[in-house]
Amino acid sequence: MSNYLRNRGNDYLLGDFFNDFFVPETPNEKHLMKTDIKENEKNLSSQICDEEIEKIVDVAMSREVNVANVKEIELEEVQESAGKETKESEVTIRGKVEKQEFRNLTYIYSDSFSNTDDFSNTKDENIFAISPNDFSANEIMKLYKTVKSIHPDSFVALDLPIIANGADLELLQNSLADLKEKAIKFDFVVSNNLYGLQFANYGYKIIAGFGHNVYNNLTTLKLKELGVCMVVQSVELEKNLTSVLPVLTMRNFRLPLMTFAHCPYKTVNSNTCKKCSYSNNLTYSKGGKQYLLRRVKLSQCYFTMTN
Ligand SMILES: [Zn+2]
């Protein structure tokens, strides 16, 4: 079970969090859970007998969650018997569905405005997530002001980078402080990794974005507890997410296939990222396909490979 969660890419850290709370929802997950338990059976056999293992699987798999037209989800009280001698743990999970006030999260990139008509027609949008190529205050402000010039009453979120080291966090904080002085305050930030959740402590409303790979309601329950107010569901999830938090639909989103923490220009041209020799339109070609490598500038360069 833990391996399965860890293998879900970006969610592996949350996987550690929820290791004890994972409930299978799809047939595939149920199969994997059974497989995992069977695989671990040898190791557990000295502590848990076969009947107890089957009981744990049955209890977990009998939990059905249906949110269609209901305001409140109440998951069954679950008793998990760890079977370790007399130790037992009981987990009760309850959640109330938040009112869905917003529907769409429309992504705006630094090069999205080659044709502003594309955005002037998006009147029904609710939240715009600006995703700059450069997290300096000036670049962020430029995007923010462009969005506001087209949709003055819109809500605007800042899409936080997937990766940020200590120096990047300092840069982010400084940029946001500069912008605040210029009376620019974001309505939301879109968190894409665990560090982003900390922004709740700085007074921001948090949307758990693509990077959190939100796959099931247990994740949304935990994210809610950690201060998140809305989520987008995992791109790996084929059905609609069962969620206690409102779920936003991403629009104009460029799916990152891979993120590089290393700047190739630094190595090839022996420069530093402060004076990076990066030029636009870097692409990677393989098997007849060409992928765009988008540079995101913080204290150093990061690269995101997209379709
Ligand atoms: Zn660089």
Image (cartoon, grey):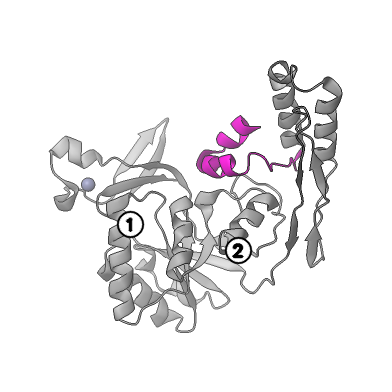
Residue 66, picture quadrant: bottom right
Magenta residues, as a range? 1-26
Q: Is residue 39 magenta?
A: no
Q: Residue at x 63, y 51 (%)?
A: 219
Amino acid on which disc 2 is placed: Leu
Say which mark, if any, is on residue 228: none
Label 2 secondary element: strand
Residue 247, picture quadrant: bottom right
- Residue located beneath label 1 in the image: 169
Amino acid on which disc 1 is placed: Leu
**Above or below: residue 50 compared with residue 247:** above
Q: Nearer the viewer, mark 2 or mark 1?
A: 1
Residue 297 appearing in the image: no
Residue 157 appearing in the image: yes
Mark 2 neighbour class, 10 Å CA radius: few under 14, some 14 to 19, many 20 or more: many
Q: Residue at x 61, y 60 (%)?
A: 224
Residue 64 left/right relative to 204? right
